[in-house]
Image (cartoon, rainbow, N blue to C red):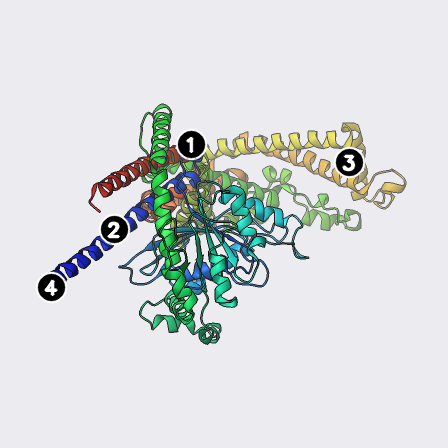
């Protein structure tokens, strides 16, 4: 007897071990199949050229009317309140929920793969995020078929994929579009199509004949082969009535019905509303509200013998249990059904994956010759290309280019000073009525430059004019001007390089290059400007001129004046065309000339002569250009005369002397600009870009950078598609092999 008892005990232990091993295998298979499904989903939604319409692995789709208890069932399975709550319809988008059993996880958490928010351990935050994502759909649209993907990792959840859909409605509310009902129906029909498993949720206190979820399931699954009926709120009806509902013979389902209460006990509801439920559930053994709900269901079902009897009765035909009760049993049932349904679809899915892989591999070979690419390699290649362009620019933009640029700037300042001190005439001032001045006064304030060649060598007036020009030029802030000029030129060239080179399609990297450029230039700006000012300081007091310098500046000054004459003539010709011809302009000029001499009144311009104010202004401009060109030609003759041949004639030839000063300022400034700013910039920018782009970008930013280029994005996406298909094929072959091994094992 004792031996028989011992044998029976061993047999029971072996049976338990086999069951545990079977369950472990089932969980492993389910997890791997979910991984395969998620990989295929990534391929379909990864922005590739086409979706994987031929490859289908089933998901569990949860449908039900509003207030049917759908959200409570899902939260009981997960063990946390995380779904949006509200009186009005809150679920406006499908929620694709993947549960991952993580026994070694330090804490339960959720992740939104598309949002890149990281691990969220606060389920209230998950709930808020879901609510915000749903409410982002405008009221006029009401629902969207763009799914929200949420992964939940926990030691208390099974490996499952669940899709929560918007609840069916009977009529649209006043603030909802009239088409809402049909939109929800169309969206649900899309998801409950084969091969997905349908979880049709109906409330026990509503006639099942009116269950929208069951009617929709019957429409797409008339034989009830892939539908599970879930009856919620069993505690709201008589237990006998509950058993009749679960044994529904008017619409039998091959997967049967499951009855649940799936609500937090009323004793905890108050604590939940106060935010205490999470702390309460954390103090229990399981650490989730699912265990609390399960215990509540166990107490309720155990209180009524009719449920106990139903659990022990078996179907006469199948010999299986007729009634399934509780959230725990629902979870286990869903796991088994998902594993079994996925298993049936594995071989067709495997064949379809291999077909997709062959097509993708062929396409990758034809388009890219099997050439691999990574975001890192593309970034490195782009950076090298930019550096090469930068090196070419640095070889072309050196001391000579800076000298020419700065000399051109100082030439313009010299011309402005000459115009101010020598060329401008007071009789051109429209506000000065010369007729009111006596001859002595006019002679004292009007010293035309035409008098300069015949002026005495010791004429104080002309000495002061030149000295003032030199002082203004040397004290005009050449250090800051030259540094600003070079900095702006470098900044502009960098902008041109990024807009025309490898980075032209990458706005983020453009910003990085421009920021690095400005930081380097700004860091050297003030010290460079100070160095230049210190070095040109002697020229503020004395400027010595060599014969060679004078001769060179004589030619350059003549060329400057010649260009000024050309510009005056071009401007005058344009002015003639704008007023209708030279004759008209000449008439206006004569009137302006007479008004300056007091021969006519300016007030009579329009009334008597028919000249508008705009025309008068053009007449003044024409006079100015004509007289300025005459003065410039006069000065050009002076520069070519013997009087301006010697450096001793600087007061007679201010154009030449000021050009000598400008040239000396330029040569001195360029020496320090080249060392302090230019060379420093050429050295530091490539290294700064290496730091910011080579090591400063994370993997995600590198990928985003690469995909800004349409051709590279296409290359990367096709390569990624091929790699994921290879991974999916490897995984699905592994699962098929595991299934075969499992079938060969003794029962």
Mark 4 residue element: loop
Gap between marks 4 and 2 measured at Cα: 31 Å
Residue 147, compared with residue 297, is above or below; it is above
| x, y percent for residue 552 | 45, 32
Which quadrant holds the N terminus?
A: bottom left
Label 3, label 2: how far apart the Cα atoms are? 108 Å
> Which circle's residue, 4 or 1, is located before the other in the chain?
4
Q: Which residue is drawn at 75% across and 41% down?
A: 617
Q: Name the residue under label 3.
A: 589
Q: Distance between the residues labelled 1 and 2?
A: 49 Å
Element on which disc 3 rests: helix
Packing grade of label 1 (10 A; few <14, some 14-19, many >=20) is few
- In this orientation, does residue 533 appear? no
Mark 2, Cα crowd under 10 Å, few <14 / some 14-19 / many 20+, is some
Q: In front: mark 3 or mark 2?
A: 2
Circles 4 and 2: CB distance less than 8 Å? no
Q: Earlier in the sequence, mark 4 or mark 3?
A: 4
Residue at numbered disc 4: 1
Task: Provide the residue designation for mark 2.
Answer: 22
Name the front one of labels 1 and 2: 2
Q: Is residue 369 visible?
A: yes
Q: How far apart are marks 4 and 3 (CA)?
A: 138 Å
Per the rendering, the mark at residue 695 is none
Q: Which of marks 4 and 2 is nearer the N terminus?
A: 4
Toward the left, the furthest residue is 3
Residue 489 percent across, percent down from the top left: 45, 41
Residues at marks 4 and 1, CA–CA distance in whole angstroms = 80 Å
Mark in the foreground, 4 or 3? 4
- In the rendered structure, are the residues bearing label 1 and label 2 in contact, judged by CB atoms less than 8 Å apart? no
Q: Mark 1 points at which residue?
A: 711
**Camera-side residue of 547 and 454:** 547
């Amino acid at each position: 007897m004792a031996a028989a008892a011992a044998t029976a005990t061993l047999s029971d232990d072996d049976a338990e071990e086999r069951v545990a091993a079977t369950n472990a295998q089932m969980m492993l298979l389910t997890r791997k199949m979910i991984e395969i499904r998620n990989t295929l989903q990534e391929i379909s939604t990864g922005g590739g050229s086409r979706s994987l319409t031929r490859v289908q692995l089933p998901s569990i789709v949860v449908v039900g009317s509003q207030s049917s208890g759908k959200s409570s069932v899902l939260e009981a399975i997960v063990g946390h309140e995380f779904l949006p709550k509200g009186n009005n319809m809150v679920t406006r988008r499908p929620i694709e929920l993947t549960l991952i059993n993580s026994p070694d996880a330090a804490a339960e958490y959720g992740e939104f793969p598309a949002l890149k928010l990281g691990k969220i351990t606060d389920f209230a935050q998950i709930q808020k995020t879901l609510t915000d994502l749903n409410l982002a759909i405008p009221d006029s649209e009401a629902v969207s078929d763009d799914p929200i993907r949420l992964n939940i990792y926990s030691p208390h959840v099974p490996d499952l994929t669940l899709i929560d859909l918007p609840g069916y409605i009977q009529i649209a509310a006043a603030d909802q579009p009239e088409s809402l009902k049909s939109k929800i129906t169309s969206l649900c029909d899309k998801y409950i199509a084969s091969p997905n498993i349908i979880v049709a949720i109906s409330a026990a206190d509503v006639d099942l004949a009116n269950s929208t979820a069951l009617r929709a399931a019957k429409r797409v699954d008339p034989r009830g082969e892939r539908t599970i009926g879930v009856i919620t709120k069993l505690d709201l009806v008589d237990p006998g009535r509950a058993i009749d509902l679960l044994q529904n013979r008017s619409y039998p389902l091959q997967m049967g019905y499951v009855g649940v209460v799936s609500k937090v006990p009323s004793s905890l509801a108050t604590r939940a509303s106060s935010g205490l439920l999470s702390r309460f559930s954390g103090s229990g053994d399981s650490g989730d509200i699912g265990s609390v709900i399960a215990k509540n269901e166990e107490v309720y079902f155990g209180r009524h013998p009719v449920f106990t009897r139903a659990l022990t009765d078996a179907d006469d035909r199948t010999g299986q249990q007729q009634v399934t009760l509780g959230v725990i049993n629902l979870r286990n049932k869903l796991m088994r059904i998902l594993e079994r349904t996925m298993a049936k679809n594995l071989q067709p899915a495997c064949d379809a994956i291999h077909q997709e892989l062959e097509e993708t591999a062929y396409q990758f070979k034809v388009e890219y010759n099997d050439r691999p690419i990574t975001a890192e390699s593309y970034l490195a290649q782009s950076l090298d290309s930019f550096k090469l362009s930068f090196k070419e620019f640095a070889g072309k933009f050196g001391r000579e280019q800076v000298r020419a640029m700065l000399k051109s700037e100082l030439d313009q300042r010299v011309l402005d000073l000459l115009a101010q001190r020598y060329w401008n005439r007071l009789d051109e001032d429209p506000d000065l009525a010369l007729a009111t001045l006596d001859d002595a006064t006019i002679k004292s304030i009007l010293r035309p430059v035409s008098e300069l060649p015949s002026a005495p060598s010791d004429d104080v007036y002309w000495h002061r004019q030149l000295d003032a020009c030199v002082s203004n030029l040397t004290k005009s802030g050449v250090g800051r001007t030259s540094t600003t000029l070079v900095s702006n030129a470098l900044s502009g060239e960098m902008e041109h390089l990024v807009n025309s080179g490898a980075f032209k399609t990458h706005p983020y990297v453009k910003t990085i290059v421009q920021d690095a450029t400005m930081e380097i230039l700004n860091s050297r700006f003030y010290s460079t400007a100070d160095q230049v000012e210190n070095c040109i300081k002697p020229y503020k007091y004395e400027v010595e001129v060599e014969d060679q310098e004078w001769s060179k500046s004589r030619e350059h000054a003549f060329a400057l004046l010649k260009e000024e004459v050309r510009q005056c003539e071009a401007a005058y010709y344009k002015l003639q065309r704008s007023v209708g011809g030279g004759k008209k302009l000449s008439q206006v000029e004569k009137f302006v000339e007479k008004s300056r001499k007091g021969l006519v009144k300016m007030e009579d311009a329009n009334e008597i002569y028919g000249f508008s104010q705009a025309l008068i202004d053009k007449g003044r401009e024409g006079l100015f250009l004509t007289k300025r060109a005459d003065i410039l030609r006069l000065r050009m003759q002076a520069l070519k005369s013997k009087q301006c041949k010697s450096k001793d004639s600087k007061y007679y030839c201010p154009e030449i002397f000021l050009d000598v000063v400008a040239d000396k300022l330029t040569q001195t400034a360029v020496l320090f600009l080249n060392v302090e700013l230019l060379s420093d910039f050429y050295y530091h920018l490539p290294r700064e870009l290496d730091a910011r782009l080579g090591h400063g970008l994370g993997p995600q930013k590198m990928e985003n950078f690469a995909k800004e280029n349409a051709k590279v994005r296409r290359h990367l996406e096709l390569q990624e598609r091929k790699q994921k298909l290879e991974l999916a094929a490897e995984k699905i072959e592994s699962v098929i092999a595991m299934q075969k091994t499992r079938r060969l094992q003794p029962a």
